[in-house]
């Protein structure tokens, strides 16, 4: 058995309750079609005032999805730090 590299994709969300499920569906399609890599998706709620957090929790039932919930617009600081913490080969932020 070969060890696949993991591609980590971070998605910054601010009041994106309608877009979280759509983004997840497209990312899941990509992950399911690409067999050379493992994928993880990190949805970061950047202090949303809508139901973004609820939607992230719904898609986080997929083991490839993680949700991080910030109380304010801290994404730039957060992503500067998380890149050093990830033990993966590739981290992308969108």
Image (cartoon, rainbow, N blue to C red):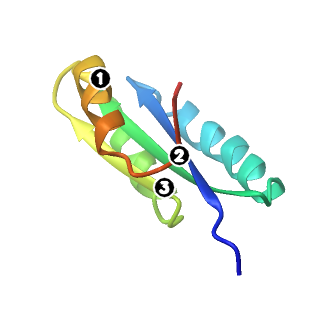
Label 3 crowd bin: few (<14), some (14–19), many (20+), radius 10 Å: many
| Residue 23 percent coordinates (x, y) | 62, 37
Q: For this view, does 61 lie left or right of residue 5?
A: left
Q: Is 69 situated above or below 81?
A: below
Q: Secondary structure at mark 2?
A: loop
Q: Which residue is mark 3?
A: 65
Q: Secondary structure at mark 1?
A: helix
Q: Residue furthest right?
A: 33
The residue under the point 57% across, 31% down is 19
The residue under the point 38% across, 23% down is 14
Q: Is 24 situated above or below 34?
A: above
Residue 49 visible here: no
> Of the residues under marks 2 and 3, which one precedes in the sequence?
3
- The part of the image, by quadrant, that contains residue 6 is bottom right
| Residue 59 percent coordinates (x, y) | 51, 55
Q: Secondary structure at mark 3?
A: strand
| Residue 68 percent coordinates (x, y) | 30, 44
Residue 73 visible here: yes
Q: Is 7 situated above or below 3?
A: above
The residue under the point 71% across, 81% down is 1
Q: Which residue is mark 1?
A: 75
Camera-near label (2 vs 3) is 2
Camera-near label (1 vs 2) is 2
Q: Identify which residue, 74 or 71, lies in the foreground.
A: 74
Q: Which residue is mark 2?
A: 89
> Of the residues under marks 3 and 1, which one precedes in the sequence?
3
Q: Identify which residue, 36 or 1, lies in the foreground.
A: 1
The residue under the point 63% across, 69% down is 3
């Amino acid at each position: 058995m070969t060890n696949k590299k993991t591609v980590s994709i971070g998605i910054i969300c601010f009041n994106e309750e309608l877009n979280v499920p759509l983004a997840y569906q497209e990312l899941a399609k990509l992950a399911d079609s690409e067999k050379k890599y493992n994928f993880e998706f990190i949805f970061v709620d950047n202090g949303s005032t809508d139901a973004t957090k609820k939607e992230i929790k719904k898609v986080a039932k997929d083991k490839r999805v993680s949700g991080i919930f910030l109380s304010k617009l801290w994404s730039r600081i957060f992503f500067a730090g998380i890149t050093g913490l990830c033990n993966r080969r590739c981290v992308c932020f969108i």
